[in-house]
Amino acid sequence: MTRVPREVRRGQIKTHGKDIVVDWNKSALIVIDMQNDFCHPRGWLAGIGVDIAPARAPIAPLRRLLPALRGAGVPIVWVNWGNRPDLANLSPALLHVYDGAARGAGLGSPLPDAPVPGARVLEKDSWAAAVVDELAPAAEDLRVDKYRMSGFWDTPLDSILRQQGVTTLFFAGVNADQCVLATLMDANFLGYDTILVEDCSATTSPGYCWEATLYNVHQCFGFSATSGALRKGLSKK
């Protein structure tokens, strides 16, 4: 029943405005909502007329970062929006996220252009909620379904991270000003150290939303850095 303490493995990372030192053995990368409904040309957002090009921008830098982190033993945690098929735990207001005009294109609605027949918006275990093919999770990665903007509400994310001995969280994914920021803020409130990975995060919202996200992260919740800075920090002994 004893837990053997992990050796401290320090890494120095250049962040916005300052250098920080992290313990890679107590760190994890949280990747949020890099899934078909948000990032695929035939997913939910594209189907309702949203330009998803920004949401796809993190794919290339994540493809470079993920192998480096896995090789260093840093856990990758995929936090995807994946609703119950019966939507029983969602409030009426949530059912109309991105469907303010009530046109029937909200959570759980059929996806008319999905390559997999019968797919419904962000339904757990469906094509809609799956990670995009370009970022296929590895067998050792961890996965958590969420049902709110924050990945911590009504999910086992916090208990999983604490069992892994994680205290520092890097954040990537979409949308940076919505689900990524909400999860990062809750992580900060729970006592984790939080770093937004800038080029591995993006938003389909207007540009000022990205600027406000960076401002709030720097001002209140932690730090931001590039994926290149993380890889450099991993390579230094």
Image (tube, rainbow, N blue to C red):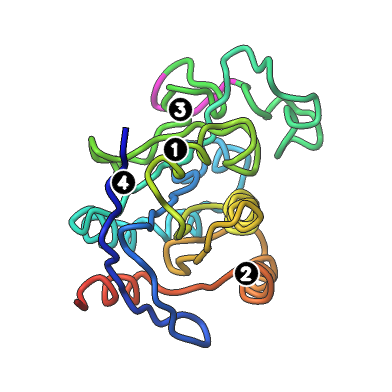
Q: CA distance from mark 3 to mark 2?
A: 35 Å
Tell me the magenta residue range.
110-116
Location of residue 225 in the rendering, given as x and y in whole percent from the top left corner: 45, 74
Q: Are marks 3 and 2 in contact (CB under 8 Å)?
A: no
- In the structure shown, which secondary structural element does the residue marked by tag 2 occupy? helix
Location of residue 194 in the rendering, given as x and y in whole percent from the top left corner: 53, 63
Q: Which residue is mark 1?
A: 160
Q: Residues within 10 Å of mark 1 (few under 14, many from 20)?
A: some
Between 102 and 33, the one lying in front of the other is 33
Q: CA distance from mark 2 to mark 1?
A: 24 Å
Q: Earlier in the sequence, mark 1 or mark 3?
A: 3
Between 192 and 174, the one lying in front of the other is 192
- In the structure shown, which secondary structural element does the residue marked by tag 3 occupy? loop
Quarter of the rendering containing residue 212: bottom right
Q: Residue furthest bottom?
A: 17
Mark 4, mark 2: which one is toward the viewer?
2
Q: Residues within 10 Å of mark 4 (few under 14, many from 20)?
A: some
User: Which residue type carries mark 4?
Assistant: Leu
Mark 3, mark 2: which one is toward the viewer?
2
Residue at 30 percent across and 72 percent down: it is 10
Whether residue 211 is situated above or below residue 52 in the rendered picture: below
User: Which residue type carries mark 3?
Assistant: Ala
Residue at 62 percent across and 75 percent down: it is 218
Q: Which quarter of the rendered picture does the C terminus lie within?
A: bottom left
Residue 110 relative to residue 106: left or right: left
User: Which residue type carries mark 2?
Assistant: Val
Q: Which residue is mark 3?
A: 114
Q: CA distance from mark 1 to mark 3?
A: 32 Å
- In the structure shown, which secondary structural element does the residue marked by tag 4 occupy? helix
Q: Residue furthest top?
A: 86
Q: Which residue is mark 2?
A: 217
| Residue 113 covered by magenta stretch | yes
